[in-house]
Amino acid sequence: MADRRGLLIILSSPSGAGKSTLAKRLMEWDPELSFSISATTRAPRPGEEHGREYYFLTDDAFKKQVAESGMLEHAHVFGNFYGSPAGPVKATIEAGRDVLFDVDWQGEQQIRNSDLGKHALSIFILPPSITELHRRLVSRGQDSDEVIARRMQKSWDEISHWGAYDYVLVNDDLEETFARLKTIVEAERMRREQQPMLQDHVRSLHSEFEEM
């Protein structure tokens, strides 16, 4: 048994708040941290491999896993199912490694209410202002004006669920925000629930006390 159980680290934010950058920084900081590989019913795109980008499943196989509580969270998006298989995540955290999730507030709630929910750590990333959020989306140069407008419209609904998260960080300075994020992860790794060896240690202390 590993010295500790891994965490299910959930990062959520409106698009443009810096979540993807912070997730990348976390994985560079700790190479043992793994990104959750989602399952999907959409067809593989050129160059994608089963078990690397996604677990590619048929509709029936996906629905079977959902019915058997095999998905930590799932959603139907643009005609296809997407979800996070529980089996690989459970094996990873039992080995003492954290798993990173990039999901919205609905996914966070599903993971929180799953069998592995007690090992979840949820963090919501807020922008310093709506004006700055819009500026970041525009400066990325990745989306059309129409797509940016849709992202901005969706952002308020996403932000309105900030109160459901364990921690909330305002990403006004990337370096400072990342430093706070690391502090949170390091502290949460020491939670009592994450240290399975503690129970045996306390038993040994109790036995030693009785022998005195």
Image (cartoon, helix red, strand yellow):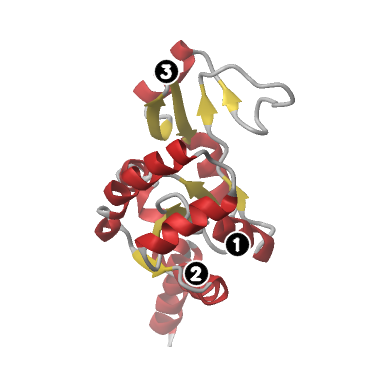
Of tags 3 and 2, which is closer to the observer?
3
Q: Secondary structure at mark 2?
A: helix
Going by the numbered disc 3, the residue's amino acid type is Gly
- Looking at the image, is mark 2 or mark 1 earlier in the sequence? 1
Determine the residue positioned at 66% across, 21% down.
45
Q: Is residue 17 left or right of residue 112?
A: right
Res 105 visible: no
Q: Residues within 10 Å of mark 3 (few under 14, many from 20)?
A: few
Going by the numbered disc 2, the residue's amino acid type is Leu
Determine the residue positioned at 50% across, 65% down.
197
Marks 3 and 2 in Cβ contact (< 8 Å): no
Of the pair 32 and 141, the residue shown nearer to us: 141
Q: Is residue 113 left or right of residue 195?
A: left
- Looking at the image, is mark 3 or mark 2 earlier in the sequence? 3
The residues bearing labels 2 and 1 have C-alpha atoms spaced at a distance of 8 Å
Of the pair 60 and 81, the residue shown nearer to us: 81
Label placed on residue 26: 1
Marks 2 and 1 in Cβ contact (< 8 Å): yes
| Residue where numbered disc 2 is placed | 181
Residue 113 position (above or below residue 120) = above
Q: Secondary structure at mark 1?
A: helix
Q: Residues within 10 Å of mark 2 (few under 14, many from 20)?
A: some
- Quarter that holds the N terminus: bottom right
| Residue where numbered disc 3 is placed | 79
Residue 172 % position (x, y): 46, 72
Determine the residue positioned at 42% across, 73% down.
202
Residue 100 position (above or below residue 187) = above
